[in-house]
Amino acid sequence: MGLRGVGARRTRPTKNELPTAMHGGIYRRRAAEAEAALPKPAEHTAGFYEHLWGRLESGSAFADLDEMRADWALRRDEMTRPGCFGTGYGKWPWSFWHFDQPPPPDCETESECVWAHVPTTQAEIDAIERMWLAATQAALNRYPRDRDRKAARAMALTDGDCPSWAFDALIAEGMARPPSAVVPIAPRRRKRRRRA
């Protein structure tokens, strides 16, 4: 809790602090119960993070890839279930791509690999498509003109993990459009001074 200005005095809690200030015990207990009801991901150790993002260059938790593969066999079901940290929205753990299924060479992005080649739920496929639509729309808002389409495609690919074919398809189907208020501003006319 910070002060709002030099010498400011707070006499009552702010709107966000009211529940914990008034009924701290009840809200803390309810929050703890809600957190206990959530599915727990695998134990967050160095090995867990190596399964998500790849082998660490310095100080790996595993002696070699065989030990990492054996640990992945134990954790695979827990780390690839929907809602687990590191999965969903087109992102899957590094160990999945390295040990179970190598990414196909024809895919531009990881989300495209998940969308096309990994057996996932329809909810995840819909989430990936919404992510691509949002990335395409953000890129078109940044680069609204047709001549900037190449830059918009590159922005959607790098920032939103949207493959080029999906970018083009979303525009062709009319699902993503440049802002309609893009009108070139006419130069101001100068008033002519009358000579006396």
Image (spheres, helix red, strand yellow):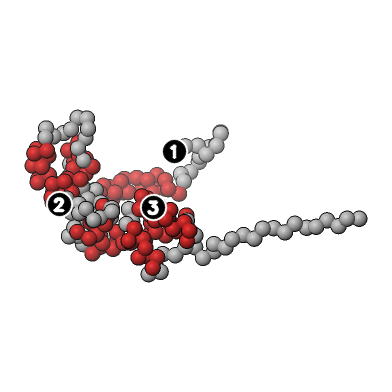
Q: Nearer the viewer, residue 31 or 63?
A: 63
Left or right, 135 with reference to 61: right
Q: Which residue is mark 3?
A: 154
Q: For the residue labelled by badge 1, is the local secondary structure a helix, a strand or a loop? A: loop
Residue at 29% across / 59% down in the picture?
Answer: 128
Q: Amino acid at mark 1?
A: Met
The residues tagged by marks 2 and 3 sit, at their Cα atoms, a distance apart of 27 Å
The residues tagged by marks 2 and 1 sit, at their Cα atoms, a distance apart of 49 Å
Residue at 36% across / 60% down in the picture?
Answer: 167
Position of residue 34 measured from the top left corner of the image (x, y, whole percent): 26, 51
Position of residue 164 measured from the top left corner of the image (x, y, whole percent): 34, 58
* Whether residue 161 can be seen here: yes
Residue at 54% across / 64% down in the picture?
Answer: 181
Q: For the residue labelled by badge 2, is the local secondary structure a helix, a strand or a loop? A: loop
Q: Nearer the viewer, residue 44 or 184?
A: 184
Q: Nearer the viewer, residue 16 or 74?
A: 74
Residue 65 sits in quarter: top left
Left or right, 15 with reference to 99: right
Precedes in sequence: disc 2 or disc 3:
2
- Residue 137, which numbered label? none
Q: Which residue is mark 1?
A: 1
Q: Are marks 2 and 1 in contact (CB under 8 Å)?
A: no
Quarter of the image containing the C terminus? bottom right
Precedes in sequence: disc 1 or disc 3:
1
Q: Which residue is mark 2?
A: 101
Q: Closer to the camera: disc 2 or disc 3? A: 3
